Image: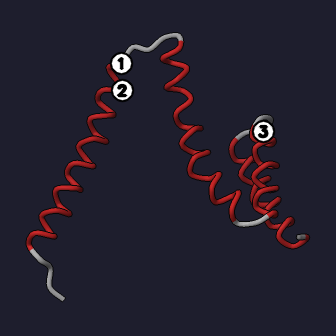
Amino acid sequence: MSLDTTTFLAILAMAIVTYATRIAGLFIADRLVLSGRAKTAFDAIPPAVLVAVIAPTALTTGWAEALAAAITAVAATRLPLLATVAVGVASVVVLRQVL
């Protein structure tokens, strides 16, 4: 198997650009002074990304996973992270056996 030079350079360029944007984001975010609505918006980004990643899988795989996601979401409002993960894993295991 041989690697075309153009393909290699394209992959290398994409890796460099991806790394540069991530590093630049860290440097820029440290220098931002946020207050009020901007701070609230930035604080909402991690949960929004998490939901965007998890929701399609949870809602398209079956009833057990959808119900487990709902149970986990409710648990997340009351429990710490490790306990929420345990509730989520336990609920999907039990619901897969039941349903």
Q: Residues within 10 Å of mark 2 (few under 14, many from 20)?
A: few
The CA span between labels 3 and 2 is 29 Å
The x, y position of residue 17, in whole percent, is 21, 48
Mark 1: amino acid: Leu
- Which residue lies most toward the top here? 36
Give the residue at mark 2: 29
Give the residue at mark 3: 79
Q: Is residue 53 above or below residue 46?
A: below
Say which residue appears at 80% left-offset and 35% top-offset. 78
Q: Which mark is residue 53?
A: none
In the structure shown, which secondary structural element does the residue marked by tag 3 occupy? loop
The x, y position of residue 53, in whole percent, is 56, 51
Give the residue at mark 1: 32
- Which residue lies most toward the left here? 5
In the structure shown, which secondary structural element does the residue marked by tag 1 occupy? loop
Say which residue appears at 55% left-offset and 20% top-offset. 40
Mark 3: amino acid: Leu
Q: Quadrant of residue 59?
A: bottom right
The CA span between labels 3 and 1 is 31 Å
In the structure shown, which secondary structural element does the residue marked by tag 2 occupy? helix
The foreground one among 89 and 38 is 38
Give left or right: position of 29 versus 19. right
Q: Residues within 10 Å of mark 1 (few under 14, many from 20)?
A: few
